[in-house]
Amino acid sequence: MKIRKILLYGFGQHENLEIDLRHGMNLLYGPNEAGKTTIQQAILHILFGFPQKNQQELRYEPKTGGKYGGCLYIEDQAYGNWMIERVRGKSSGDVLIRFEDGRIAEEEELKRLLRGYDRQAFESIFSFSLFQLQDLEKMDENDLSRTLLASGTTGLDTLWKVEKKMEKEMGGLFKKSGKIPPMNKKLAEIRELEQAMQKEQQKLSTYEPLTIRKQELDEQVAALRFEEQRLYKQSEEQRIAMQIVPLQQQRNQLLEQLSHLSDEFPAAGIRRYEELASKQSELHLKKTRLEKEQAEWQSELIDLRPDNERQQLERWVAQEAEWHRLRTDRFAAEQEIRLLEKKQQQFSNRLGLTDDQQLSIGKIDVSIQRERQLEPILEEQKELDQQVKAMQRLLAEAESERQEAEQRKERTDRLRLTESERAKLANWPKLQRQLAEAKFIVSAADKQASNQMVPIVILLIGLAIGAYSVLQQQWLFAGLGLVVVAVGAWLWKQRPDSVTDQQSFIRDNEALAAELEKLAERDDLQQHDQRQVLVEIERLDRKLQKYAEEMEQLYYQKQQAEKKLQALLQDEPFDLTFNIQESFRLLREYQDAEIDQKTWQQRLQTTTQQLQSLIKEVEKVLGPVAEEGLFERIRQELLRQNSLQEKHMSKQQAVLEIKEQLQETQELLESTTAEIQKLFDIVGVSEKEQFYTAYEQAQDAQLLKRQLKEVEAQLSLYSKEPLVKEWTIPELERQRSETTNRLQMLRQEVETLVDEQVKVGHEISQMGASQTYSELQQLVEVRKAELEELTEQWVIRKAVRESIRQTMSEWKEHQLPAVLIQANNWFSRLTGNRYATLGLTAEGYFEAVTVEGQSFMINELSQATKEQAYLSLRLALAYELSERAPFPIIMDDPFVHFDNERLSRMIEILTELQPSHQFLYFTCHQEMKSKWSSEPHTIEIGRKVKGEIY
């Protein structure tokens, strides 16, 4: 199951956001507050529903109030490609699922597509973040082992959290040595109240005589009440016996009458006899009618053609396709012969053959061997033709290039400067020099005033050197002084007369200078292009001369090859030099056509003989027939014979059916007669009148049985019959009167004892001893009820905890071994083979064993190693579930505590998992892009609310 695209209409800070994902690793990078967690939550919300507004989880509704929701495009090997869209609607959002074939589904189908996983189960296996790994540092040995066990079995850390919560709540309700838990408090209160009740009971010892008397009175009253109930019950039995005795007497009379009547008569005997008698009469009539019909059909049977002739007709009809095939073959042979004759004539016309030459074609050797003798010459001629065509093509291309060069030369000549432009261009060097001097003077005028005195200083230095040298008669230094004086005089002469005049000169000639500069550039370009064109024309002329010489050589070689070919074919009856290959091909086809013509003529003769043979066989049976209507006549005759056969078979079938019906009627008649006799035998009679008399006696017996049943029903209403079965009504009345008198006496005795009982109880109550005791007793009952409620809560939590432990134990036995095998491999690789295995101790705690065999409990490992153990188990579980739950794995920066070496190993493991799982890796660390050996699909998430991210 792969997510191909995420489309968010409005979710948190994102609106109209579209992200394309790929198989394997997808790296979603962005700085803090860029919305990475929002995108992660969007995936979970769309798949599993928006949280309720009263839940702790955020709903991420759009801040601007736009459309809330989005859709995911999913590629699923089991169910094909489908799209899920969830938008604002009912509490968890309105869901729409659309498949590739156009089917549309809703929330019920989504459960099947998600393999029954809810959000909690999905997050516990396929989604984990840095915060979950940071929690490992705060756990003790027991918590760490339980967390790793849950990660390696179902991934449901929630089960362990629920178990831990149950244990905490159980400890909050009761502790063996505790005093603060509610159950401990209730037990202490109950013990205190029971001790108080014992003290109150000791006070009651002074009232023992009254208590004994009250107990005696209670026993006497209870005995009299019991006797009263017995007598009342006896009175009721006597009353019921007075109702039962008349019914018993009536039952005895009915039994006496039934003993003189016989009730052995079959159920519905009269109806069954009358139905059988009616059926017997109908069967006699049907038998007579069938015997008459059988005689009539027997007289209508007809004679038919012999079976061998009819079978021959059927065989001929079966051969109709073969007949038409033969006629078609004959027609095809005739057509093929005509086509071959026409084809031979066409070959003859194309070759230009006379009648004598046509007769000699069969003797010409046009074999492949002969043609191969000519192949070298033909190949040489063909190659020369190709070379001539290629050379002609090269000549044409060279001529085209020569014309294009001439056209470029003409265009270059048209760009040549005019005489007036050349006159202007002649003044350009002088003007350029003047402008440079003017610009230099203007720039020099901006210097300080002391620089303007340089020529005067140089003149004075030169004069001083000259004067000194003359006085000293140093003529060399005197010459040097004259040079210095000349330099100073030249500088004085070159000083600007006016800076303003130079600036004006620059402004006046600046436009002209730009124009002349463009003319100079244009002239240089034109001269350069013209030189290039002339060189190209000269090169193309040499090339054309070379191609012309090569063409003449090829024409000469081609003439020599044609002469050699004519010399080899001069003995043939006609000229084949115009196209050897085509001539050989036509001659071969002409000879093949002659051979095919002879073959088709032989097939035509064979087919015609087969057709004539079949016509003669048919005429022996049906007489003279035409070839065109042969099978029409055969089919008509066969249809006529089949029709007669069907009529004959129909009549014969009718005779057989009548015979079968007659036999069936006879059997039914015998069966009916036997059933009537069976009824007579049951009653023990042999005639119809005796049967009816037995029926009347049976009816009388049935009436007596119904009356007896009613009496029995009335007797069954009573719980039991009187103890003495021979009672009479007067005796019952006497005994009931005695019982009533005894009851009145007992009631008077009970009233006397009850009065005394009330008096003694009043005296005891006046002493006030029972009030405190009853209050304590009531308070004890209240505290016991409260303790019972707390105990029930404690038992429920214990049952939940034991159920979770049992479930985790089953998971550990069945699922954990396969996960541990893969997890051990990855854990060993992540730790650089420092640890060999990661397993469970007998007490259920996880331990890591080094290669040397040294064991470390899980809480003794470093934080990074704990995280690596956790990730190894989590990924191994996802790997084992890849067939049943091939979900993408979502990770939120879980490798922060890994060094570079272990990070590279983890990336290698993730790379191995990419064929079976898609990965969505959210990170704010830019350097994670360069950690992967192969470039992952990277999506950069920026700081913006609206827009698209690609």
Image (tube, rainbow, N blue to C red):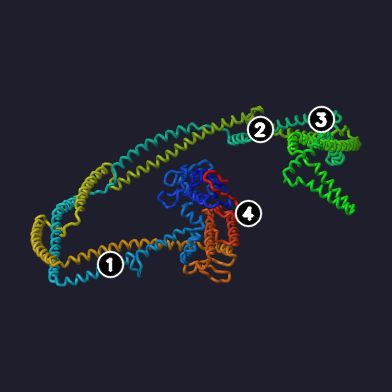
Between residue 238 and residue 668, name the one nearer to us: 238
Q: CA distance from mark 4 to mark 1?
A: 72 Å
Q: Please identify the quarter of the rendering in which residue 333 is found.
A: top right
Q: Which residue is mark 2?
A: 324
> Which residue is farthest front?
471
Identify the residue position indicated by label 4 in the image: 934
Left or right: residue 94 compared with residue 265: right
Q: Is residue 280 left or right of residue 550?
A: left
Q: Residue at x 79, y 48 (%)?
A: 457
Q: Residues within 10 Å of mark 4 (few under 14, many from 20)?
A: few
Q: Which mark is residue 418?
A: 3
Residue 133, image x and y in percent? 51, 60
Name the mark on residue 576: none
Q: How many marks?
A: 4
**What distance separates the C-alpha of mark 2 from that of mark 4?**
73 Å
Looking at the rendered structure, the secondary structure element under dot 2 is helix
Residue 303 position, x and y percent, is: 54, 32
Q: Residues within 10 Å of mark 2 (few under 14, many from 20)?
A: few
The residue identified by callout 1 is 189
Label 2 and label 1: CA atoms lie apart by 117 Å
Q: Earlier in the sequence, mark 3 or mark 4?
A: 3
